[in-house]
Image (cartoon, rainbow, N blue to C red):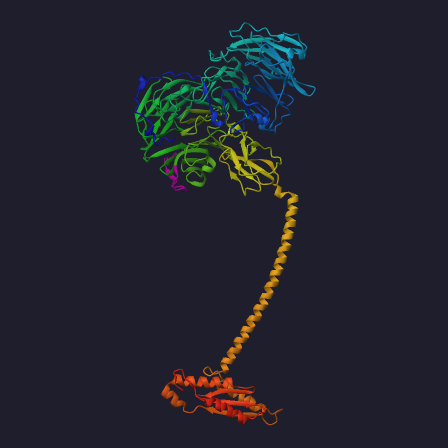
Amino acid sequence: MSFLLKNKYFQPLAIVFGCLLALSAARPARSQTIAATRYGMAAGLTNTAVLSALQLPNGEMLVGTQHGFFAFDGRQFLPLGPEQGLPVGGMAQAAVMTAGGDLVLVLLDRIYVAHAVTADMPVLGLHFVPVAAHAALSRDEFRKIAPWRGGLVMTDRDRLLFLHRVGGEDRIDTLESVLGLAEGTLTDVSALHAERDRLWLGTGGGRLCVLAGRSLHCLPVPALAPPRRVDAIAEDGRGVLYARTLRSLITADPARGTLRVEPVPHIGTQYENYQRFLTLAWTPDGRLMTQADDGELAIRTDDGWTMRMLDGEPIAAPLSVVLFDRQRNLWIGVPGIGMILTRGFGVFENFDRRNGLSGAIIWQMLRRPGGLLWITSDSGIDALDTAARRVVRAIPQAAFLIAADDRGRLWHDGPDYLARMDPATGLQQDYDMRRINKILPGREHDMWILSDTGAWRVDTARADTTPVPVPGMGGAYASGLIDRDGALWLIEGRRLLVRRRNGIVTVARAGWPKADFIPNLLAAQDAHTLWVTGQGGLYRATHDGDRITALTAFGPAEIGTDMTYAVLVDHRGWVWIGSDHGLALFDGAHWTRVTAADGLIADDLDQDSLIDDTDGTIWVGTSRGLSHILRPEQLRRAETLRPVISRMTLGDAPYDGRAVAFSRAPFRVTFGALDYRDEGRIRFRYRLEGVDEGWNEATEDTVRYPSLPPGTHRFLLQAYDPGRDQEPAIVAVSLGMGRPWWQSPEVRIGEIMACGLAGYGLWRIRVGLLIKQRRKLRETVERQTAEIRAAHEALVRQSRLDSLTGLLNRGAIQAHLQACLQADAPGADRAIGLAIGLADVDHFKAINDQMGHLAGDEVLTEIGHRLRRGRRHGEEVGRYGGEEFLIVLQGDGDKAARMEDIRRSLSRAVALSSGRT
């Protein structure tokens, strides 16, 4: 959150002057809050009455509830049931791994075991078998369990039972019978702890005993505050024993022979009916932790007890499970809520109004050497004793800015004033000054005040000094810093200015590569490097003292956003960038994102709200409170991404990847990641080889394919964290789907033979068709040739015949006559006998003139008809012209007589269509 629009957040406050300023003691901080994520019914935990939890060898969390066991794969809880050989539901009291690698599930009156469980086995793929109980189990709701000597010791009302393998099978006997002890030796046991060959026992009467071999020895525990029942036992690496009753912690050192009892803090009546839930757990840094009332956790340190409470809504129910996983994450079970995964336990501690802070919106912090941490907020200024973790002073004046001068006086802003306050006396002096943006301690007994109305300077060497405007510096300065050489760097609008100690101001940068970039804060990394945050991203600027010589831009790909509010370069040289997307940490080589998923109290940081404390820790102000990063180096610890395929199904049936008979049932894959710390940031891609062309982004925790193709395939799942610089992790599983009957070898051979026969038949048909087509083509060619020949002959005839008479035309009869003359010429081989006659129609012109040309045409047509009809072999007749006809006779006959016959045939009257002749 930026305070550039701070008038939106300030409310008018009364100004308290001088010694009238009231410094009030703030509410003491009861406990620091722990960021947490809650998993209930929405996450698949259909029963939220959590009774037990265990992290399995493969990293999955196995949670027992009043209605069965559930496995958590990093995304959702999946129930165990008949698919794993277990009943539906049942009170799941405990899950335990034995030294031999067996997983034992204890229900109220039944016990199941899966043998030889390894790190590559998902729990949903295990098969459990019931254990024969030679000593019948009672329905003991207060049962305690501990693995010991390769088996499992458990309480069963007023006796101890032992689960062990005899003759290759699991069985349950009384521990007394197994050890050869007299009946009644081991009674009233309420707590168990196994360490090597020793078994520690706590009793309902407050005794603490150890069973070694067949010997039972009890420690001399003094009288305890009632109820005296021992409910939890733990042992540290030095052999020191700790035992918990409702109100007391017993510490016993058998080697030294010492034993002492101390009260557990903040214990009332909440656990009186739930003592069986009490436990002792070791934090990752080796501190003892146990439950307290109101959802709090008590941590025992060398200086006493410190308290922690979960962020979010207060918890009224007892804590039934307290468990650290192998990634140092703290899991808490709460009946009625489900499972709670804390974020950043041991790395972060958070403070808000519940811890005594005046307000939740934290702006700036100031650490006085060896003193208090001063904190400004919208509701006041607080002084936090970080050693005692409690607010010891509170000033009811809202402020954004705070700084200290070389005399130890505090300077802070107000709605319309600048205040100077002496923490020792409480005296405060106010100066009329508005729209202050930065208070900078100088290097020569001075303070610099940057505002929208210019730069002001205060001579801190004088007790009665007042801020005076700096000549030539009347601009609106959003922020600034004083570097190690004493130069003052300033942000004015979009410009970056530098003022040398001699008072000369130069423009180091007038604009930025991104036109919309508006700078708001500066931090110096070394003598020649600045970091510039603002609206539009982040720049690393290299300068030569007066001007910027190089710029490197960073944006959403590195810092997650292009709107930055805070920047800090710590003593390690690491760069911290704050925004409304949390923190981005740059160690000089890699960027790392830090968000509420890691333990920040909120992702929305406030402007200029980062400080590097003297002990190397980092304080972060947010819009929901204050975060303290206790171990910054832990934020750079890259966890190995561990994607896991938790369940596969074909239709409604479980599927383990082995080849099955062909099915068109849909194929489903459910997956998650066992990197619980980064669960909120991890993304997934998947690919089914032979089906998907490339990687697909997963939007849910389940992938569905309409069916699985026949053959062998690989399903690939890739997990990656876009906020961390690390290689994606891939897990693969082989899948086998049988081929349908129509793809069997026999059917394939039949198909090949059928295809061969069909091909041969088609070939025969094709050959027949080709032959038929060839014959048809030949017939078509012959027919078309005949037609062409006939057409040609017709054309020839048409070119030689007269169209009116049907006789040879002039050219044709002349050609015929010429051929005959050549054949009958002297010297020819054989004379053919040739006679030529020319017939002329008499009075033809009169016919045309008197009867018309059509009548003339009829006469010529009739003459042509008569000549054609009477023509004999060797005779040709042609129309020579008009009404003239040339007659050519060949042969040996009487040609004169033949000519006379022709003339007579032509002389007969011609009947016209008009009736005339």
Residue pictured at 51% horizontal, 80% vertical: 797
Majority secondary structure of magenta residues: loop
The residue nearer to you, when weighing 626 against 645, is: 645
The image quadrant that residue 142 belongs to is top right
x%, y% of residue 472? 32, 36
x%, y% of residue 402? 38, 25
| Residue 917 counted in the magenta span | no
Residue 869 in sight: yes
Which quadrant, please, contains the C terminus?
A: bottom left
The residue nearer to you, when weighing 621 against 17, is: 621
Q: Is residue 176 left or right of residue 19?
A: right
Q: Which residues are magenta?
A: 499-518
x%, y% of residue 441? 39, 28
The residue nearer to you, when weighing 660 against 182, is: 660
The image quadrant that residue 393 belongs to is top left
Residue 487 in sight: no
Residue pictured at 45% horizontal, 84% vertical: 862
